[in-house]
Image (cartoon, rainbow, N blue to C red):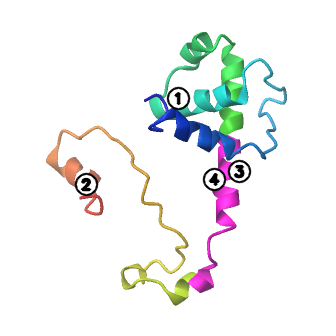
Amino acid sequence: MYTGIPTSELFIVRFELMNDIQIKYYAGWNVQLIPNVDQLLITLMKLRLNLPHEYLSIRFNCSTATVTNIIMTWIYTLDEVIFVHLMKTIPSRQINQACLPAAFTNYKNSRIILDSTEIYSTVPASMENQRLAYSSYKH
């Protein structure tokens, strides 16, 4: 509910994927009183709900500077785990070119399509702006 991850078991699985990553804190000082699993929770709550740092600091009994340090650190850590490590398993452009679908002939530099990204937006009042925001791909 707070993170977008459906169950606590899946949350723990995602957390365990990051056990081998060396965490280098953004602000240069380590956060020792908040367990790493809660630090990930803080970050995902911020990303999912855009909660104010003040609210998160009260909820997790720490300062807003600590919340900022945690969020910035874990965003870089998530980038390391999700992007850098994932990209090592993505085929090269040359290999992708050999099996590129016809629909992607105009996108020869594409290496991967992420079909799980969903961005919510406010529905514009004017029909013209609604038309501009509409995605035929998703409908």
Indicate left or right for 126 with 3 as reference.
Answer: left
Q: Pointer 1: what residue?
A: 45
Q: CA distance from mark 2 to mark 3?
A: 32 Å
What x and y, as percent, mark residue 94? 61, 85
Spatial CA span between label 1 and label 3: 19 Å
Q: Estimate the x, y position of residue 4 in percent, counting from the top left.
A: 45, 37
Q: Quadrant of residue 101?
A: bottom left
x 47%, y 36%: residue: 7
Instruction: Using the image, determine if residue 124 lies above or below residue 63.
Output: below
Magenta: main secondary structure equals helix
Of label 2 and label 3, which has the lower sequence position? 3
Q: Amino acid at mark 1?
A: Met
User: Earlier along the polypeptide chain: callout 1 or callout 2?
Assistant: 1
Report the span colored magenta.
75-95
Q: Does dot 2 land on a helix, a strand or a loop?
A: loop
**Spot occupied by residue 58 in the image (x, y as percentages of width and height):** 59, 10
* Image quarter of the N terminus: top left
Q: In 3D space, how far apart are the residues under numbered discs 4 and 3 (Cα atoms)? A: 6 Å
Note whether 53 is above or below 114 in the view shown.
Answer: above
Taking the magenta stretch, the answer to whether it contains residue 92 is: yes
Residue 42 picture location, percent across and down = 60, 26
Q: Determine the residue located farthest toward the left in the rendered image.
A: 127
Question: In the rendered structure, which disc, 1 or 3, sits on the residue that comes first in sequence?
Answer: 1
- The residue under label 3 is which amino acid type? Glu
Q: Quadrant of residue 26?
A: top right
Q: Which residue is mark 2?
A: 134
Mark identifier at residue 82:
4
Residue ranking furthest to the bottom: 98
Give the spatial CA distance, label 1 vs label 2.
Answer: 28 Å
Say if mark 4 contacts mark 3, CB within 8 Å.
Answer: yes
Q: Residues within 10 Å of mark 4 (few under 14, many from 20)?
A: few
